[in-house]
């Protein structure tokens, strides 16, 4: 029977990678490559003649800039938030380029499926939106966050702890887990269906029907790969837009 | 001892295969961040974000803004040119209308003059015609009167002679003339 | 703990094996239960958003942005369930 020859591998064996150099593994490679590719694309785009209609690399860069400006900043922060465009742009590009290796052949590992990158980015966003809150509102930030106006005084006993937990604790946690768990789930699904396909093809069985059946998990694998293309983009978008919402909420109280 | 190249080669081969060969410990679970991954990714993101903030993005944005500004100003100048052209066309049309009105006025004046001249000539011709007709009528009347006198004389003569023959006495000329005149007038 | 000993007694597994078996099955329950609420929530949310976009196509961009935000918040619960599944199951 198949079930005897098929067993899902230990989870660390599909997530942890050997060091290429000292302390430099595949995750680090993908992260560094994401930074380098982003830099190179924008460097090449900046070199091109800006006065002509944009083509190729420059078009790509300008489309991404306009996506961040119109799709994220204008929708959440309005015109005041335009100064955050470079940060949100680099956040979006970095996350997207870390997500996308999950479906690139031979890489096949989303760097964000390890918790290090989402956790670092979420903590960075946490520090930034709290810092922005104190910078824009001074100590009033604490008041407007923990004691939202328009609530009866007696309810503050209930509201303040909830607000504290949801704003200060849950936000970075959910930001981390959303990105990390989505990418990890996608990665595990891809591994599962790839292993199912492989074990059906290589099964030592006398039932001839069993080997052609490998087309079923393979079809699912193809479908999931296409789905992961969407997920990689969507998760980068959601992380960025939530960052924009949090920062926008810190600059203007009660939004 | 391995050289660095051999090590690199081996690492790249390992890169393409899952790391299952190495004994994986269960120790750092999947939700515990690994320090080496943390600082590599943090470092590359921070460098990328700083580059983007202070160098790459301003450069790109400057080009984009300049181009948009150029497009906008080109639009505006095109609008200005279009309104200029419209004004010129209106000007030209006004001139054309003025010239047309002038021409119409002149044509009207000429037509009036022509009409007056024609009327005058017509009156002249009519007058001449009337004159001639009057002359002709007078002549014809005169001739008719002459013919009547002739006929009167002849008839009087004939009547006188006929009376003379019939009565043996010559009737007075006066009576004959009066009778003939009466008959002819009837 | 009592459950483990019951399973161990019933199946003849040793204590650790019984614990692993219990962990595996409860991991499945953890994720399955965690997925119910967000499943209903996301379905309702997207359905309402589509309705809103169909009624007022000119507001589609804003509705879509808000929809993605809502999905992100709702989905977090299912993902926490998934993390629990990873923690206790694998």
Image: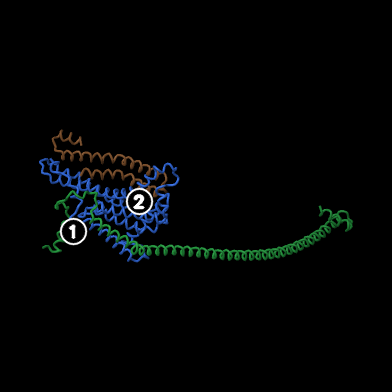
In the image, is residue A166 above or below residue A57?
A: above
Please identify which colour was used for chain A in the image.
blue
Front-most of A128 and B144?
A128
Q: Are marks 2 and 1 on the same chain?
A: yes
Does residue A209 appear in this view? no
Where is residue B82 shown, x and y percent of the image? 48, 63
Alpha-carbon span between mark 2 and mark 1: 34 Å
Residue A4 image offset from top left, x and y in percent: 13, 41
> Position of C37 compared to B182: left or right?
left
State how the image is colored.
Answer: by chain
Depicted C5 relative to depicted A181: above or below: above
Chain letter of the residue carrying label 1:
A
Numbered disc 2: what chain? A
Secondary structure of residue under mark 2 = helix
Give neighbour class at mark 2: few <14, some 14-19, many 20+ (Cα, 10 Å). Answer: many
Work out whether residue C78 or residue C68 is closer to the camera in this orientation and state it.
C78
- For residue B4, what is the image quadrant? bottom left
Chain coloured brown: which letter?
Answer: C
Chain coloured green: B
Mark 1 Cα-neighbour bin, 10 Å: few <14, some 14–19, many ≥20: many
Nearest to N terminus: mark 2 or mark 1: 1
| Residue where numbered disc 2 is placed | A242
Determine the residue positioned at 25% across, 57% down.
Answer: B39
Q: Element under label 1?
A: loop
Residue A237 pos. (x, y %): 33, 52
C85 with respect to B107 (left or right): left
- Which residue position is annotated with label 1? A20
């Amino acid at each position: 029977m198949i079930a005897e020859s098929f067993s899902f591998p230990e989870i660390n064996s599909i997530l942890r990678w050997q060091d290429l150099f000292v302390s430099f593994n595949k995750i680090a490679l993908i992260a560094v490559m994401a930074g380098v590719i982003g830099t190179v694309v924008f460097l090449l785009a900046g070199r091109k003649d800006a006065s002509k209609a944009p083509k190729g690399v420059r078009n790509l860069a300008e489309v991404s800039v306009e996506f961040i400006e119109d799709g994220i900043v204008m929708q959440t922060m309005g015109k005041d938030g335009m100064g955050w465009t470079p940060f949100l742009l680099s956040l979006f590009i970095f996350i997207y380029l870390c997500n996308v290796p999950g479906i690139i052949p031979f890489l096949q590992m989303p760097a964000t499926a390890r918790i290090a990158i989402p956790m670092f980015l979420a903590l960075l966003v946490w520090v930034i939106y709290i810092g922005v809150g104190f910078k824009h509102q001074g100590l009033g930030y604490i008041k407007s966050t923990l004691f939202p106006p328009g609530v009866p005084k007696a309810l503050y006993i209930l509201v303040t702890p909830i607000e504290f937990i949801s704003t200060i604790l849950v936000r970075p946690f959910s930001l981390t887990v959303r990105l990390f768990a989505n990418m990890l789930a996608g990665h595990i699904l891809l591994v599962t269906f790839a292993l199912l396909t492989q074990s059906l093809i290589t099964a030592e069985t006398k039932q001839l029907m069993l080997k052609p059946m490998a087309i079923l998990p393979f079809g699912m694998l193809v479908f999931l790969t296409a789905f992961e293309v969407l997920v990689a983009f969507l998760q980068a978008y959601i992380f960025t837009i939530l960052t924009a919402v949090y920062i926008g909420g810190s600059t203007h109280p009660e939004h | 001892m391995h050289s660095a190249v051999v090590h690199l080669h081996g690492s790249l081969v390992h890169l393409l295969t899952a790391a299952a060969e190495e004994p994986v410990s269960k120790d750092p679970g999947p939700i515990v961040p690994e320090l080496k991954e943390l600082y590599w990714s943090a470092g590359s993101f921070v460098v990328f974000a700083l580059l983007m903030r202070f160098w790459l993005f301003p450069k790109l944005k400057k080009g984009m803004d300049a181009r948009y500004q150029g497009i906008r100003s080109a639009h505006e100048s095109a609008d200005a040119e279009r309104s200029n052209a419209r004004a010129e066309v209106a000007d030209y049309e006004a001139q054309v209308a003025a010239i047309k009105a002038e021409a119409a006025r002149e044509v009207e004046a000429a037509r009036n003059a022509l009409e007056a001249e024609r009327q005058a000539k017509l009156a002249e011709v009519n007058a001449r015609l009337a004159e001639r007709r009057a002359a002709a009528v007078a002549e014809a009347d005169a001739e008719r009167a002459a013919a009547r006198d002739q006929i009167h004389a002849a008839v009087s003569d004939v009547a006188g002679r006929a009376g003379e023959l019939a009565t043996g006495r010559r009737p007075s000329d006066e009576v004959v003339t009066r009778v003939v005149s009466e008959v002819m007038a009837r | 703990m009592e459950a483990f000993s019951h399973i161990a007694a019933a199946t003849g597994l040793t204590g650790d094996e019984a614990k692993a078996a219990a962990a595996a099955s409860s991991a499945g329950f953890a994720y399955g239960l965690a997925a119910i609420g967000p499943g209903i929530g996301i379905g309702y949310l997207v359905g309402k958003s589509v309705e809103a976009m169909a009624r007022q196509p000119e507001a589609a961009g804003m509705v879509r942005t808000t929809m993605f935000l809502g999905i992100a918040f709702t989905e977090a619960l299912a993902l926490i369930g998934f993390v629990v599944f990873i923690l206790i199951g694998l």
